[in-house]
Amino acid sequence: MKEIWVEKYRPAKLDEVVGQLDVTARLKTYVSSGNMPHLLFAGPPGTGKTTCAIALAKELFGEEWKGNFHELNASDERGIDVVRGKIKEFARTSPMGMKSFKIIFLDEADALTSDAQSALRRTMEKYSQTCRFILSCNYSSKIIEPIQSRCAVFRFRPLKEADVKKYLARVAKEESVTIKEDGLAALVYIAQGDLRKAVNSLQVAAGMSSKIDADTVYQAASTARPELVKELIEVCLKGDFMKGRNLLDDLLISQGLSGEDIIRQIHKSLIESTVKDSLKIELIDKVGEIEFRLVEGSNDRIQLESLLAHFALMGKQK
């Protein structure tokens, strides 16, 4: 699905960026001085990294920002040829409109190969007079140390619940969509601090109904209701494996969820559950093991049933 609403409501100024006050305050100092170093934006998806880069360029360059701002997605073009070709060609040319530098925004830079990153560090150094780099990544540990040392690092945090609700309410008002309170809570639960995911889920839900409640949201996002996952855990901990298996069938078959979707929701429900810490530790340890097996390609049903059987055994023992 195209991220129509995400682009439509993308903030144009740093003041409008949601939930990243510390980051935007630091970026404003670069705007006021008219200069900036190379930057590294690190943090989870949907927290405003691309938005901050675009807003920064707009405030620095004004109407000429498009000519002085070049965006590349490193996950699509991740080889050394791209660094030596497209990036180098843009970096070596003079900025437009009497500006002192231009900006290359390299999104998902942690997808660059090691060779490409090694070539990039030299380019960043050689053309720093005419070009500044903004690197965006989910995991800064995947960026080689020489590049990190050349950049000012900005850490983006998952958005708070209040910020997500406020932004979604604004979008819903502009689009004449009615969100019930339980629907708003469901969107926050699904987003987990990822505003892009929240807005996209809202857009899909709005296509299904003009009045959005929790059922519409969970159906649109292909996510199980947290109550069902909680019930699944509680039933198994009481030792009723077959009832738990029937609930699992409903999630896998009727709702069409994947094993990885279910295991992540089980993990979240366990973290929030009231079971004793000693039991919770053992259960989460097992959840981690099953999740690894699923990622490696094991059968969803067998692994999840194995997890439920373990829950039932642990529940009886404890």
Image (spheres, grey):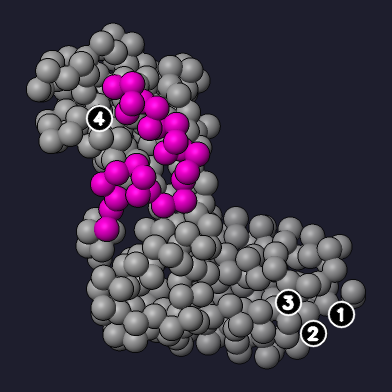
According to the image, label 4 marks what residue? 60
Q: Position of residue 201 (x, y in %)?
A: 36, 70
Query: How busy is the neighbourhood of tag 1: few (under 14 within 10 Å), some, or many (20 plus)?
Result: few
Kindly check if marks 1 and 2 are in contact, taking CB atoms under 8 A apart as contact.
Answer: yes
According to the image, label 1 marks what residue? 316
Residue located at (57% from left, 65% from top): 264
Residue mark closest to the camera, 3 vs 4: 4
Magenta residues span: 9-34
Query: How busy is the neighbourhood of tag 3: few (under 14 within 10 Å), some, or many (20 plus)?
Result: many
**SS under mark 3:** helix
Q: CA distance from mark 1 to mark 4?
A: 63 Å
Q: CA distance from mark 1 to mark 3?
A: 11 Å
Whichever of labels 1 and 3 marks the residue nearer the N terminus, that label is 3
Q: CA distance from mark 2 to mark 3?
A: 9 Å
**SS under mark 2:** loop
Is 115 positioned to the left or the right of 192 in the image? left
Label at residue 239: 2
Residue located at (36% from left, 45% from top): 15
Placement of the C terminus among the 4 image quadrants: bottom right
Q: Picture quarter containing residue 126? A: top left
Residue located at (47% from left, 59% from top): 163
Residue located at (34% from left, 86% from top): 211
According to the image, label 3 marks what residue? 309
Whichever of labels 1 and 4 marks the residue nearer the N terminus, that label is 4
Q: CA distance from mark 4 to mark 2?
A: 62 Å
**SS under mark 4:** helix
Q: Is residue 49 visible?
A: yes
Q: Position of residue 198 (x, y in %)?
A: 40, 65
Is 243 situated above or below 108? below
